[in-house]
Image (cartoon, rainbow, N blue to C red):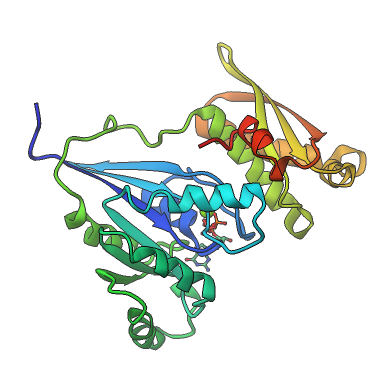
Amino acid sequence: MTDLNQRCGYVAIVGRPNVGKSTLLNHILGMKLSITSRKPQTTRHQILGVKTTDNIQTIYVDTPGIHQRRGTAINKYMNRAATSVLNDVDVILFVVQAKNWTEEDRAIVEKFKTVSCPVVLVINKIDKLASKKELLPLIDELSVHYDFSEIIPVSALSGINVETLEQKLAPLIPEGEHVYPDDQVTDRSMRFLASEIIREKLIRELGQELPYTSTVSIDKYEEDEDIVHIHATIYVESAGQKAIIIGKKGSRLKSIGTKAREDISKMIETKVYLNLWVKVREGWSNDERALRGLGYGE
Ligand SMILES: Nc1nc2c(ncn2[C@@H]2O[C@H](COP(=O)(O)OP(=O)(O)OP(=O)(O)O)[C@@H](O)[C@H]2O)c(=O)[nH]1
Ligand SMILES: [Mg+2]
């Protein structure tokens, strides 16, 4: 039976790397679902974040930053994961960084020419502007790039104007029954979210030293009565990278493990035992078969 009072729709969050897409999703959901960092190309997979308020269910799709870097298999996978949603959603949120329009942004706008849904331009990081007076000229300047259905300046980090963004989105969500139970927040398993948290700690701990070519795989996720046992492996591409991650006397790996364990434990509200290994797997990031084995499947 269809309840005509219900509305439900998919909203893609797209943009080039590092503009604040995942931060925006987390602010909207009021929880940390998608990992974030100062480094571009943090998000590697599509992640659904579901928000149900009253009769409206909005299913946000966080995506990897669309980029124009060298075409290794993993880079191609990430671009596919981001652009494949464009034709399957009801609304597109195109996130850009205030006063930082680039060639990569322009290339993304090109892709909108073949989509039929409304595109909302979200100008993020407005907390970094010297003065509010800069906003109107900025909106004027960006409006020439496409026929955006709305242009909304926000700060995903501090939350400025994010509620306004949600209010403007509401009328664009079509009628339809809710796809997910009203209390569900994501389509992803705890196992996947745990691997993402470990990857976040890895990225944050290593900063510029981190090779893009590392990934995390969960070997065991076992729920006991009052503790969850997790065994995970960090894969890198060379012995040098492995040594960097492990650090002096294992200090780096220990710090990554401690921080990850704390966050995972907070998320699942259970004690966590986390065992981390680092292994070398040469060339995994440019090997389609290895990628699929490591969770980068279609
Ligand atoms: N000052 C400021 N920083 C922000 C804002 N939103 C995000 N950031 C920062 O920008 C960086 C990138 O944020 P992410 O949310 O990881 O960006 P992303 O677009 O998801 O990046 P990818 O997943 O790599 O494509 C992080 O250091 C965030 O803290 C904002 O509104 N203001
Ligand atoms: Mg992201």
Q: Is residue 208 above or below residue 59?
A: below
Q: Is 207 situated left or right of 75 in this image?
A: right
Q: State which quadrant residue 169 falls in.
A: bottom left
Quarter in which the N terminus is drawn? top left
- Nearer to me, 47 or 128: 47
- Residue 227, image quadrant: top right
Residue 266 in view? no
Total number of numbered labels? 0
In this rendering, the answer to whether 148 lies above or below 201 is: below
Horizontal and vertical percent for residue 107?
A: 48, 69
Name the residue located 85 percent from the left edge and 43 percent from the top edge: 238
Seen at 29% across and 62% down, the residue is 165
In percent of the image, x 68 and y 52: which residue is there?
Answer: 204
Determine if residue 135 is in view. Answer: yes
The residue closer to the viewer here, 46 or 80, is: 80
Taking the spot 55% from the left edge, 50% from the top edge, the residue there is 78
Q: Residue 86, image x and y in percent? A: 37, 54
In the visual, does 90 lie left or right of 107? left
Task: Choose between 245 and 229: the one closer to the eye.
Answer: 245
x then y, percent, for residue 18: 56, 62
Q: Position of residue 43 (x, y in %)?
A: 55, 50
Residue that lies at the very extreme toward the top in this rendered image: 225
Task: Name the residue at the right extreme.
Answer: 249
